[in-house]
Image: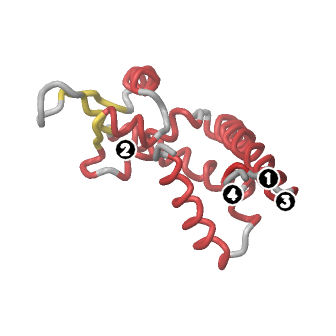
Amino acid sequence: MPSAQQQPLTASEEAFVRELSRVMQELPRAVDADILREAELPLSEYTPLMHLSEAPDQAMRMSELAAACSLSLSGMTRVVTRLEKQGWVERTKSTQDGRGWNAALTELGLQRLERAWPAFLVSVRHHLVDHFADHDLPRLTAALRHVAATGAEPH
């Protein structure tokens, strides 16, 4: 007899998986289109600026920034190169081991993020947050945090 994990999905489980997959594809596209239109900043550039703004000293190791943005290190390097050309981020050698690189948010980068933030808020509220009651959000957040943590583990 197959284990519970090998059992076919129920109709409600299948519907949930399909809708979640659709949201995972469509939500970033919708938010990207909104902030690109309203603030002329793609989500791929907004996200690292946001993470850097929240980091201690507004700086992170490139590998940590890549992980926070769900990008490969090479993908993050390409994004940071674009941000550097705009003067929004500076890249420096790590003082911890001299091998790694850090990305640091510049004052110009912080200003750019602050200009785009209202468009991001409106978009995220419209496409996601407003669809849930306030009392649902802590449970949803905890469930998604758990899913993300177990998703990083081998099975």
Name the foreground residue: 145 vs 9. 9
Mark 2 and mark 4: span between their CA atoms? 42 Å
Can you identify the residue that label 4 sits on? Answer: 4
Amino acid identity at mark 2: Leu
Earlier in the chain: of badge 2 and badge 1, it is 1
Q: Is mark 1 in CB contact (under 8 Å) with mark 3?
A: no
Amino acid identity at mark 3: Ser
Q: Which mark is residue 142?
A: none
Can you identify the residue that label 2 sits on? Answer: 52
Earlier in the chain: of badge 2 and badge 4, it is 4
Q: Is mark 2 in CB contact (under 8 Å) with mark 4?
A: no
Name the foreground residue: 90 vs 115. 90
- State the colouring used for the structure image: secondary structure
Amino acid identity at mark 4: Ala
Q: In the shown orientation, is residue 100 left or right of residue 22?
A: left
Q: Quadrant of residue 92?
A: top left
- Tell me residue 150's x, y (percent): 50, 53
Q: Residue at x 79, y 57 (%)?
A: 13
Q: Residues within 10 Å of mark 1 (few under 14, many from 20)?
A: few
Name the foreground residue: 151 vs 19. 151
Q: In the shown orientation, is residue 65 left or right of residue 147?
A: left
